[in-house]
Amino acid sequence: MASSRAIWILSISIVLLSSVAMATDHIVGDDKGWTVDFNYTQWAQEMIFRVGDNLVFNYNPSFHNVFKVNGTLFQNCTFPPENEALSTGKDIIPLKTEGRKWYVCGKADHCSARQMKFVITVLAEGAPAPSLPSPPPSSDARHVVSSVFGVVMATMVTIAAIFA
C-alpha cells in the first residue's frame, strides 16, 4: 500500500512540476543585461520563446527603462507615456500569450541610435521549435529552472524508493 501511495504522489508531482520545468527565464542581453550598443535583434533571434517563459531585464534604472510597445511604435522608436515604463532595473515580464512582442528603451536615443530594441515571437507551450540559424550560446542563467527541476525530481525518486 505504501509503495502505491508513493508512486501516486510521484506521478502527481511530475505532472504538476512539468509545466514549471518547461518555463525559461530569458535574461535579456545575457550577462550584458539591458544596455546600449548590444545587438538585441541577434540575441532574440538565437532564442526560442514560449508561453510561460519570462523575459528578465537587468539594468541601471538611472539610465534605462523598458516599454512594451506595438509594431508601429517599435518601428518609429516612439513610446507610450513615461508612467507606463517599467523602471525598477530588475523587471520580469511573463510571456502569457502567443504572438509578436516588441520591447524598447525609452531613454534618450537608446532605441533609435543605440540598438536598445527587439522583437520576439512567442510560441505556444509545446509547439515545435523553428530551426535556429546557429545554436544559442550556453548560459547558466537559462538553465536554472531545468536544474531546479532535476534536483526536485531526484529527491522525489529517492523518496519513492524509500517508501517502495
Image (spheres, helix red, strand yellow):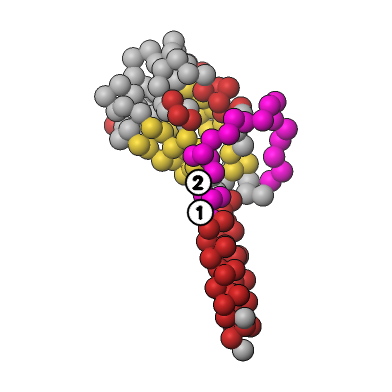
**Could you say which quadrant of the image residue 12 lies in?**
bottom right
Task: Tell me the amino acid under the disc marked 1.
Answer: Val
Indicate which disc residue 144 carries. 2
97 w.r.t. 109: above or below: below
For the point 59% across and 43% down, which residue is it?
50
For the point 69% across and 40% down, which residue is it?
129
The answer to which of 122 and 76 lies nearer the viewer is 122
Q: Judge whether residue 144 is colored magenta.
A: yes
For the point 70% across and 26% down, which residue is it?
133
For the point 56% across and 28% down, which residue is it?
44
Quick one: label 1, few (<14), some, or many (20+) residues within 10 Å? few
In the picture of the structure, the residue carrying the numbered disc 1 is: 148
x, y percentage for residue 141?
Answer: 49, 39
The C terminus sits in image quarter:
bottom right
Instruction: Kindly check if marks 2 and 1 are in contact, taking CB atoms under 8 A apart as contact.
Output: yes
x, y percentage for residue 104?
Answer: 44, 24
Query: Residue 71, can we see it?
Result: no
Q: Which residues are magenta?
A: 127-149
x, y percentage for residue 75?
Answer: 51, 18
Kindly give the residue lying farthest to the left in the view shown. 62
Say left or right for 98 vs 88.
right
The N terminus sits in image quarter:
bottom right
The answer to which of 56 and 152 lies nearer the viewer is 152
